[in-house]
Amino acid sequence: MDKLSGLASKLGGHKSSGSGDGAASGSQGQEDYVDKGLNTAEKKFGGGKVDPEKMRSTNEKVTDTGREQFEKATGKNVPSKISN
């Protein structure tokens, strides 16, 4: 769990403090397929030590950064079918 938190803080540090944080908090009530997949992986591989609800803000940062990196690498938006 410490590794995930450390990764999230590193990834979160690359975001601009302007609109990026507002977008994450605006979509915080919604869980898309990517968020649900991360929660499932935490439950399955976390050994019962990781509570996805407590890690919600960290998970949002991780998935949002993943989406940004995908869009940056491919030049395409993440399909709206799997992302909010």
Image: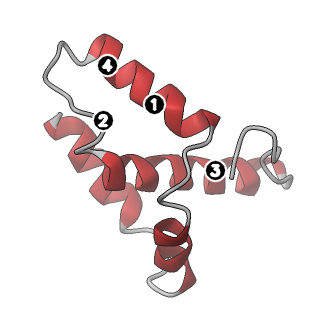
Q: Quadrant of residue 32?
A: top right
The numbered dot on residue 67 is 3
How far, Cα to Cα, is label 2 from label 3?
A: 19 Å
How far, Cα to Cα, is label 3 from label 1?
A: 13 Å
Sequence order check, earlier mark of 3 and 1: 1
Sequence order check, earlier mark of 1 and 2: 1
Q: Residues within 10 Å of mark 2 (few under 14, many from 20)?
A: some
Tell me the residue at 52%/27% (across/down): 37
SS type, badge 4? helix
Nearest-to-viewer mark from 1 and 2: 2
Where in the figure is residue 54, as x and y percent of width and height? Answer: 22, 45
Where in the figure is residue 55, as x and y percent of width and height? Answer: 27, 45
In the image, residue 54 sits, relative to residue 45, either above or below, namely below
Q: Residue furthest front?
A: 29
How far, Cα to Cα, is label 4 from label 3?
A: 22 Å
Marks 1 and 2 in Cβ contact (< 8 Å):
yes
Which residue in the structure is indicated by mark 1? 38
Q: Is residue 15 visible?
A: no
The numbered dot on residue 43 is 4
Nearest-to-viewer mark from 2 and 3: 2
Q: Nearer the viewer, residue 78 or 48?
A: 48
Q: Amino acid at mark 4?
A: Lys
Q: Nearer the viewer, residue 73 or 16?
A: 16
The numbered dot on residue 52 is 2
Sequence order check, earlier mark of 2 and 4: 4
Q: Quadrant of residue 47?
A: top left
Q: Residues within 10 Å of mark 4 (few under 14, many from 20)?
A: some
Marks 2 and 4 in Cβ contact (< 8 Å):
yes
In the rendered view, does 64 fall on the left or right side of 73? left
